Image: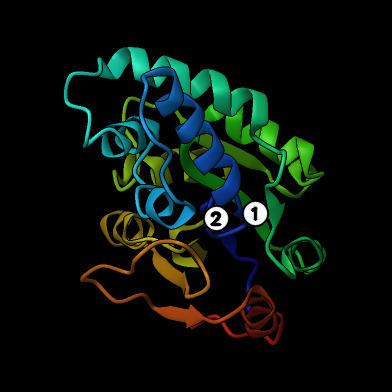
Amino acid sequence: MGASLFIFDLDGTLVDSREDLTAAVNLMRREFGLEPLSVETVTGFVGDGVRALVERALQDAPRVDRDAALAVQRRHYAAHLADRTRPYPGVCPGLAALRSAGHRLAVATNKPQEMAERVLAALGMSAFFHTVLGGGTLPFLKPHPGVVEEILRRTGASREWSWMVGDHWTDLETARRAGIRSVFFRYGIGQPGEHPPDLSFESFDDFVRHFLKGNAT
C-alpha cells in the first residue's frame, strides 16, 4: 500500500466540540433576549459553517439581525472554543500512528480558519497536520470540491490515494464531487446523507487499524 492522504473534518470527526459550540450559541441568544437551546438542538445545526449555525439557532427570532448575531456568536466562541472541547478517544495516538506509517494528514473544516487553528493548537494537535484549511480561506465551503483541490495542490498528493474522512454528508459529498474516496465515522454528530461512503467505522481506533493493516481499497 502506498502512502495515503487523509483529509479530516474537525468537529464531530476529530474533536467533540458540542458543549463549547452550544455555550457560544446560547451566550449569543442571551444577548438578544432569547432562551437557551439544548446541546442536542445545537448539535443538529452544526456542519455547514458558522453562518448556517447562527441562522438555524435563530429560527425562532426572525427580527434579529443575522450579521449582528454572527459577530456576537464569533466573539463568544473565540473566548470559549477550547473550554470543554476534547479529541475523541483514540484520535491523538491514531494520528501519530498514521504519520509514523508515512501517511499525510490534513484538515478541511467549515469552521473559520483562525478558530480551527486555535482549537488544534489548544489541544496539542497542530503538529499532526501538513495542512489545515478552514472556512474563509477560500471563497467556498465544503461540499465544494475546490476544498479538496486546494489541499491536493498544497500537499502534492495523488487523488488516487486520497480520502475525505468525516461524520457529515458534506464530507461525503465533497469527496464524491472531487473524485476521491470517503470514510464516514458513525460516532460523530452529523448525518451521512444520500450517497454512501466507501468505508464506515464505529471508532477512530477501528479506522486506524484498518489502514495500518495495509488496506487501501
Q: Which mark is residue 105?
A: 1
Apparent side of residue 140 relative to residue 129 in the rendered image (left or right)? left
Disc 2 marks a residue whose amino acid type is: Phe
Query: Closest to the observer: 87 or 96?
Result: 87
Q: Earlier in the sequence, mark 1 or mark 2?
A: 2
Q: Are marks 1 and 2 in contact (CB under 8 Å)?
A: yes
Disc 1 marks a residue whose amino acid type is: Leu
Residue shown at the point (72%, 69%) measured from the top left: 89
Apparent side of residue 137 relative to residue 155 in the rendered image (left or right)? left
Apparent side of residue 170 relative to residue 189 in the rendered image (left or right)? left
Colour pattern? rainbow
Between circles 1 and 2, the one closer to the viewer is 2
Query: Closest to the observer: 67 or 26?
Result: 26
Q: Which residue is label 2 attached to?
A: 8
Q: Residue 165's x, y, as percent?
A: 50, 63
- Outermost residue, left side: 62
Q: Is residue 83 above or below residue 181?
A: above
Apparent side of residue 173 relative to residue 23 in the rendered image (left or right)? left
Assign a secondary structure to mark 2.
strand
Can residue 122 be seen from the camera position used here? yes
Q: Callout 1: few (<14), some (14-19), or many (20+) C-alpha neighbours within 10 Å?
A: many
